[in-house]
Amino acid sequence: MQLRPMTSAAGTLLLAVLLLCSGSLTSAHNITRILAKHPEYSTFNHYLSITHLASEVDRRTTITVCAVDNAAMNELLSKHLSIYTIKNILSLHVLLDYFGAKKLHQITNGTALAATMFQSTGTAPGSSGFVNITDLRGGKVGFGAENNDGTLSAYFVKSVEEIPYNISVIQISKVLPSDVAEAPTPAPSQQNITAIMSKHGCKVFAETLLASDAEKTYMDTLDGGLTVFCPMDDAFKAFLPKYKNLTAAGKTALLEYHGVPVYQSLAMLKSNNGLLNTLATDGANKFDFTVQNEGEEVTLRTKITTAKITGTLIDEQPLAIYTIDKVLMPRELFKKAEAPTPAPAPAPEPAAADAPEAPKKKKKKAAAPADADSDAPADSPDDAADVTADDNGAVRFDGARYISVVAASVFGFLLL
């Protein structure tokens, strides 16, 4: 068979499909590589990397990075702030929306309030994690931290690189001042994990952890990275009877099962499905669970239970603590409930030797259907292949044959 040239309509359709497929391949970005092409932002780029903000930026789409040059960064570094405080300050310079140069000069009503990565950590109280952007007279665009009374303290300098509407990297004139972001941030080893839990609805789990050897495991792991999934009070209270029935080793393993020995931001959990090992993992004793996400919802699945992340208590490298609505139950400690096996039917008792034999019932001959067609078989294979009836008597078409017909029609159209 000779193939005819593809029609313009079919060619346009094919081109559109290819563009859609390729679009998903070009959406990725790498903030470190983008800034590496501009030496004047080398200090800003360096601190994005060592605070792990760069990896957070790369995992997100529709984002704006407000970079500052080396002179502005040197002014910030002269304050001798901890690396954890510097992370808070720089996260205030990552906007969770796309602002290219054109959009900055066309802001609706002249001003906008943009959420930042600092706000998304859950550690920024109130609106302190927002930045006010205002289009000013003479072509200027001002930026100011919202908790600083919205005072515009920095200005748009130029666009560094734009990938609409994925990432925009722009330069602003100076670091945005913010008393909240610049507040001293304790080092991870100084964080009181159980106090954080107790203040935010996980008091029962925190008190149980304090009374266990597992608390030391949590603290020993903290500096290297730790993610905790903390059951809310109602969930853990309901679970306490099962917890009390565990052995001492089982109780420790259960508590350690709620900790992961690596830092996992919420963005990481939303973008990575798969197995996570826990603090309880020990050789053949896997003690792992599966992370699954759908949109903004993240669930943790064991062989026994499925829990949902309901909130963020802290998300600051290297520590993240999230609340969950159920206790995670590992298969190593709990077995899935099995359906009870039905008892065998009792064997019939043998009939007495002198008992009279029961009279046999005559089998009735099945009557033929009143409206049966004598010329057609009761079940025609040809008819059954195309049309069948459901339990309610409704007629439905065979899906496979219907799809094959449609597919053949489309292929024939492309050959015209």
Image (cartoon, rainbow, N blue to C red):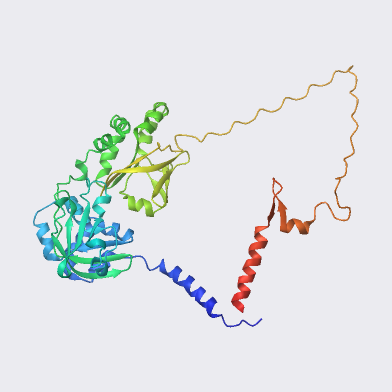
Residue 342 in picture, x, y percent from top left = 64, 30
Q: Quadrant of the C terminus?
A: bottom right
Query: Residue 149's spot in the image, x, y percent?
Result: 14, 52
Q: Where 143 falls versus 276 (above or below)?
A: below
Q: Is residue 99 above or below residue 344?
A: below
Q: Which residue is pictured at 20% across the width and 53% down the height? A: 87
Q: Is residue 23 left or right of residue 111?
A: right
Residue extending farthest to the front is 109
- Residues 41 and 296: in front is 296
- Front position in the image: 222 or 163: 163
Frontmost residue, 287 versus 26: 26
For the N terminus, the image quarter is: bottom right
Instruction: Give how far across and how far down residue 229 sits, in percent.
Output: 34, 41
Left or right of 85? Residue 319 is: right
Place of residue 13 in the rendered image (x, y in percent of width and height, measured from the top left): 51, 73
Q: Quadrant of residue 205?
A: top left
Q: Is residue 386 visible?
A: yes
